[in-house]
Image: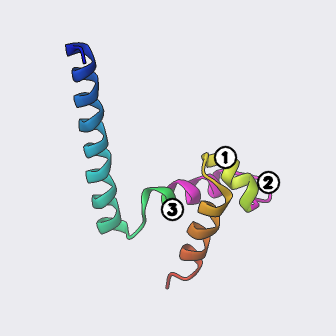
Amino acid sequence: MSTYEDRILRAMRRMTRAIDLHSRRLAAQVGLTVPQLVCLRAIRADDREVTPSRLADEVHLSRATITGILDRLSKRD
């Protein structure tokens, strides 16, 4: 592997780590995961009726993932 490729891989690892740390802080501060927050923001921004399929397309997640997120959000106190 070239030095250039090594640098890219290290940079990707740093980005992944920064995302993970941010996600943990967000969950601790507001009790939401990043995907949950992304879904809530998308729902709020859409003037139309939001269906799970439309939401999945909007936030680029699978319909099964959206169903799990919506189930967890609906069970919150």
Q: Position of residue 4 (x, y in %)?
A: 25, 14
Marking on residue 36: 3
User: Which residue position is annotated with label 1?
Assistant: 58
Marking on residue 8: none
Check whether the beta carbons of the residues at disc 3 and disc 1 lie within 8 A of each other. Answer: no
* SS state under label 1: helix
The quadrant in which residue 18 appears is top left
The quadrant in which residue 5 appears is top left
Which mark is first along the chain, 1 or 3?
3
Q: Position of residue 8 (x, y in %)?
A: 28, 23
Indicate left or right for 62 with 13 as reference.
right
Give the residue type at disc 3: Gln
Which quadrant of the figure contains the N terminus?
top left
Magenta residues? 38-51
Instruction: Compute the Cα span from label 3 to label 1.
Output: 13 Å
Q: Residue at x 55, y 83 (%)?
A: 75
Check whether the beta carbons of the residues at disc 3 and disc 2 lie within 8 A of each other. Answer: no
* SS state under label 3: helix
Q: Residue at x 25, y 45 (%)?
A: 17
Q: Position of residue 6 (x, y in %)?
A: 22, 22
User: Which residue position is annotated with label 2?
Assistant: 48
Residue 57 part of the magenta-drawn span: no
Indicate left or right for 38 with 51 as reference.
left
Which mark is first along the chain, 2 or 3?
3
Nearer the observer, 6 or 56: 6
Q: Pointer 1: residues within 10 angstroms few (<14), some, or many (20+)?
A: some
Instruction: Compute the Cα span from label 3 to label 2.
Output: 19 Å
